[in-house]
């Protein structure tokens, strides 16, 4: 059920913060072991087959290899056919993706497989090392690897040692 999930997280977590004061965000490729097991912890789990929705609620932590996702709630929408393929993954409340020194934070993150797009909203902050990019909304197209930050974008680029 989570075969596309970590590809999404990998791409949203690791932006190249290249275009200072711009709204475009370029994304680089990242090594990730998609065959590693996915471990999910939450205070509560429920599934409703009539609506094709799995809900992880309360202190949700999803880990695969070095990648970590935490949120107040993670909803997984899946197909109603026999494949049970994921159609959307929605993380809500204090959403944080982390991989080493790189991270992305927002109040909501939604990945829709049909459009191959991730939308993060609500005080979005992306950090890579000592550099940071913030705005109110970030949209990432996973096919093209291009993204856009919207809503009073602020970029801080730092190089070298502190």
Image (spheres, rainbow, N blue to C red):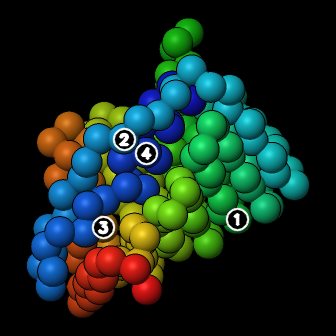
At x 62%, y 72%, the residue is 94
Q: Do the residues labelled 1 and 3 touch (CB within 8 Å)?
A: no
User: Sequence order check: which comes first, mark 3 or mark 2?
Assistant: 2
Vertical side of 114 occupied by 96: above or below: below
Alpha-carbon span between mark 1 and mark 2: 26 Å
Question: Where is mark 3, residue-wise?
Answer: 138
Q: Is 107 positioned to the left or the right of 51 in the image?
A: left
Question: Where is mark 2, residue-wise?
Answer: 30
Mark 1 is surrounded, within 10 Å at the Cα level, by few (under 14), some (14 to 19) or many (20 or more) other residues, namely many
Report the quarter where the C terminus lies: bottom left
Q: Is 106 positioned to the left or the right of 151 in the image?
A: right
Q: Are marks 3 and 2 in contact (CB under 8 Å)?
A: no
Question: Where is mark 1, residue-wise?
Answer: 72
Alpha-carbon span between mark 2 and mark 4: 7 Å
Comparing 80 with 110, the one in front is: 110
Question: Where is mark 4, residue-wise?
Answer: 10
Give the x, y percent position of residue 155.
26, 84
């Amino acid at each position: 059920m989570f075969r596309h999930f970590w590809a999404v997280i990998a791409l949203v977590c690791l932006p190249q913060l290249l275009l200072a004061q711009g709204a475009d965000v370029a994304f680089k490729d990242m090594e990730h072991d998609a065959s590693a097991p996915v471990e999910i912890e939450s205070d509560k789990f429920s599934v409703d087959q009539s609506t094709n929705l799995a809900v992880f609620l309360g202190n949700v932590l999803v880990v695969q290899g070095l990648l970590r996702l935490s949120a107040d709630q993670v909803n997984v929408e899946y197909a109603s056919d026999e494949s049970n393929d994921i159609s959307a993954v929605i993380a809500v409340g204090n959403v944080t993706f982390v991989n080493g020194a790189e991270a992305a934070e927002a109040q909501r993150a939604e990945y829709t497989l049909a459009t191959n797009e991730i939308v993060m909203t609500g005080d979005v902050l992306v950090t890579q090392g000592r550099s940071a990019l913030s705005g109110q909304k970030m949209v990432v197209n996973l096919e093209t690897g291009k993204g856009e930050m919207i809503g009073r974008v602020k970029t801080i680029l730092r190089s070298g040692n502190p």
